[in-house]
Amino acid sequence: MSDTSQSPVRRGLFATLFLDHPGSVNETYLGHMRFALGFGFWLGVAAMAALVHAFVPALCETTASRILKRLQARMDNRHKA
């Protein structure tokens, strides 16, 4: 005798951790993961460019700000129909 249904408490915790937020922005878990990983990657690139610029001001003068503007536009346009 096997019961494949999840208990309400267990489903609630699973949903809270993995499904509720992606659902609130009309995305699947994997779609949201893809967006967040890409976003995080470009934030890391922007951070590295800012660090390079901090030590050598002639390098990466506008790289971080260009990336951040592009990410902001991507977020703003994300769910427009």
Image (cartoon, grey):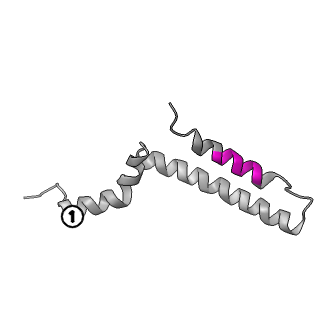
Side of 34 relative to 44 (left or right) = left
Find numbered disc 1 in the image and state the secondary structure of the residue it sits on: helix
Majority secondary structure of magenta residues: helix
State whether residue 54 is above or below residue 80: below
| Image coordinates for residue 52, horizontal then vertical, percent | 83, 64
Q: Which residue is most to the right?
A: 58
Q: How many marks?
A: 1
| Image coordinates for residue 70, horizontal then vertical, percent | 69, 45
**Quarter of the figure with residue 13:** bottom left
Between 1 and 20, the residue placed more toward the observer is 20
Going 76% across and 52% down the picture, which residue do you hit? 65
| Amino acid tagged 1 | Val
Going 11% across and 58% down the picture, which residue do you hit? 2
Residue pointed to by mark 1: 9
| Image coordinates for residue 67, horizontal then vertical, percent | 72, 50
Side of 81 relative to 64 (left or right) = left
Going 33% across and 59% down the picture, which residue do you hit? 16
Residue 69 covered by magenta stretch: yes
Quadrant assignment for the N terminus? bottom left
Which stretch appears magenta? 65-72
| Image coordinates for residue 77, horizontal then vertical, percent | 58, 38
Residue 38 covered by magenta stretch: no
Between 46 and 37, the residue placed more toward the observer is 46
Between 5 and 77, the residue placed more toward the observer is 77
- Mark 1 nearby-residue class (10 Å; few <14, some 14–19, many ≥20): few
